[in-house]
Image: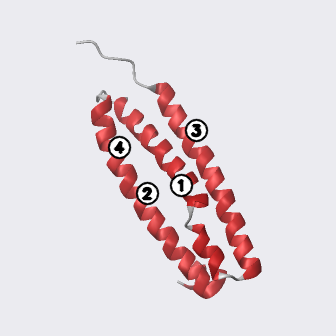
């Protein structure tokens, strides 16, 4: 049986895509929260969940999915099996992180940045 070479290029490409999308996500989130902090408008935080933030978040998830599936292929699994394992894990983790981000934004909107003070706990 002939085995193909593991996708090392896809492993690095997925990693770089996730890192670059994460940087864009961070910049957009920081700018939006800073703009909200200056104006204290609820409209700006509601806008945060729009495509301006969703597109980099999707890029992060796509990069992680490719990275994860390529990493699974390094252990000898086929591409179909690797993506069948990697895609649901990525979607589940992405949904959990997106819901947590929404909860944090609601906390910030209700109590300001002091609502996130972790030293109180």
Task: Characterize the local packing of mark 3: few (<14), some (14-19) or many (20 or more) Cα atoms within 10 angstroms.
Answer: some
Pointer 2 residue: 94
On the image, the x and y values in percent for residue 45 come to 61, 75
| Quadrant of the snapshot with the N terminus | top left
Q: Residues within 10 Å of mark 2 (few under 14, many from 20)?
A: some
Disc 3: which residue: 16
Sequence order check, earlier mark of 2 and 3: 3
Q: How many marks?
A: 4
Q: CA distance from mark 1 to mark 4?
A: 17 Å
**Residue at 67% in and 60% down:** 28
| Residue occupied by mark 4 | 86
Residue drawn at x 42%, y 43% is: 65
Q: Position of residue 93 (x, y in %)?
A: 40, 57
Q: CA distance from mark 1 to mark 2?
A: 8 Å
Of the numbered discs 4 and 2, the one sitting upstream in the chain is 4
Mark pair 2, 3: CA separation: 18 Å
């Amino acid at each position: 049986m002939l085995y193909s070479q593991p996708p090392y290029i896809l492993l690095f490409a997925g990693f770089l895509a996730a890192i670059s999308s994460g940087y864009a996500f961070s910049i957009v989130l920081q700018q939006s929260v800073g703009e909200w902090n200056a104006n204290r408008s609820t409209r700006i935080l509601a806008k945060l969940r729009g495509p301006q933030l969703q597109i980099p978040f999707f890029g992060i998830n796509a990069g992680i999915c490719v990275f994860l599936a390529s990493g699974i292929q390094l252990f000898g699994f086929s591409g179909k099996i690797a993506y069948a394992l990697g895609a649901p894990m990525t979607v589940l983790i992405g949904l959990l992180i997106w819901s947590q981000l929404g909860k944090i934004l609601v906390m910030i909107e209700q109590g300001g940045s002091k609502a996130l003070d972790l030293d109180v706990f």
